[in-house]
Image (tube, grey):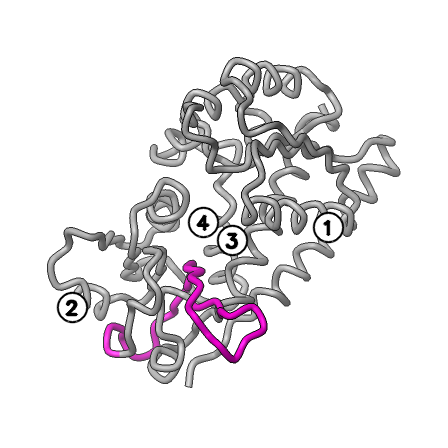
Amino acid sequence: MATIIDGKAIAQTIRNEIASEVRSLSQNYNKVPGLAVVIVGTRKDSQSYVSMKRKACAEVGIRSIDFDLPEDISEADLIEKVHQLNADADVHGILVQLPLPKHINEEKVLSEISIEKDVDGFHPLNIGKLAMKGREPLFLPCTPKGCLELLSRSGVSIKGKKAVVVGRSNIVGLPVSLLLLKADATVTIVHSHTQHPEHITREADIVIAAAGQAMMIKGDWIKPGAAVIDVGTNAVDDPSKKSGYRLVGDVDFQEASKVAGWITPVPGGVGPMTVAMLLKNTLDGAKRKIAQ
């Protein structure tokens, strides 16, 4: 049976570390990190993410400033808001909650965020530096960074290992494959046009599942003893639950946990780490500015 990687517990340890650093910033410089969160419209999932982030900020002592903007705001007005936050010295991180409404160009808005405040790590310059050898981005994207942190804090070494990333999204698949490459893994990306994905995945010492397909990765896709990080969160119908559904990952947990060496559950694996890494990025941005 696999060792269960408890993302909730690891994230809590990281949050405790952040809280003590925030306290010392406050004592030494009389300043605390500030995170601005911009939401456009009223998507339910965005609202729940944001309330989770707000609670997490409060717990570690980071000042969280929220901007709820109407669904029909113009692109120019949204960019104007971003420029105001770029200029605000008390804001060390700016997070624009995605997805944005259809009439707004996401790429345009994200590239207007100051690279020094890009705590999501999606600014083209940060991703570009991540892709290049010998360059260090100012911030790493939160979910990929959380995946590698789970591996390292569970004692899984990456150097020289075969890693397979299932999925190639801008948010997880692509940046996590770049991070694994930086950590000296041999990386293969499996996607919707890959032939025989199960054969490729079965060779991996490390599997990062980020395809957005419920329970797609079965037990026989996993090499015995491999480390499996499941980024997927998919709702499947479950009449026995009060909500009528339950969350499952991209990995069939029941099957895979019998074969893998390590595995993350869904929920309680990668999710809490994403928020912890956002807090860590905000702290790092503040430390760079305040300690100047």
**Residue picked out by circle 2:** 199
Q: Residues within 10 Å of mark 2 (few under 14, many from 20)?
A: few
- Please name whichever residue, 214 or 206, is drawn nearer the observer in this view of the structure: 214
**Residue picked out by circle 1:** 55
Residue 65 in sight here: yes
Residue found at x 61% / y 30%: 94
Image spot of residue 260 (x, y percent): 36, 77
What secondary structure is found at the residue carrying circle 1?
helix
What secondary structure is found at the residue carrying circle 3?
helix
Q: Earlier in the sequence, mark 1 or mark 2?
A: 1
Q: Amino acid at mark 3?
A: Gly
Q: Is residue 223 magenta?
A: yes
Disc 1 to disc 2, C-alpha distance: 42 Å
- Please name whichever residue, 16 or 38, is drawn nearer the observer in this view of the structure: 38
Above or below, comparing residue 77 to residue 61 in the picture:
above
Q: Amino acid at mark 4?
A: Pro
Q: Earlier in the sequence, mark 3 or mark 1?
A: 1
Toward which corner of the image does residue 117 lie, by quadrant?
Answer: top right
Disc 3 to disc 1, C-alpha distance: 19 Å
Q: Amino acid at mark 1?
A: Lys
Q: Nearer the viewer, mark 3 or mark 1?
A: 1
Image quadrant holding the C terminus, namely: top right
Residue found at x 79% / y 45%: 61
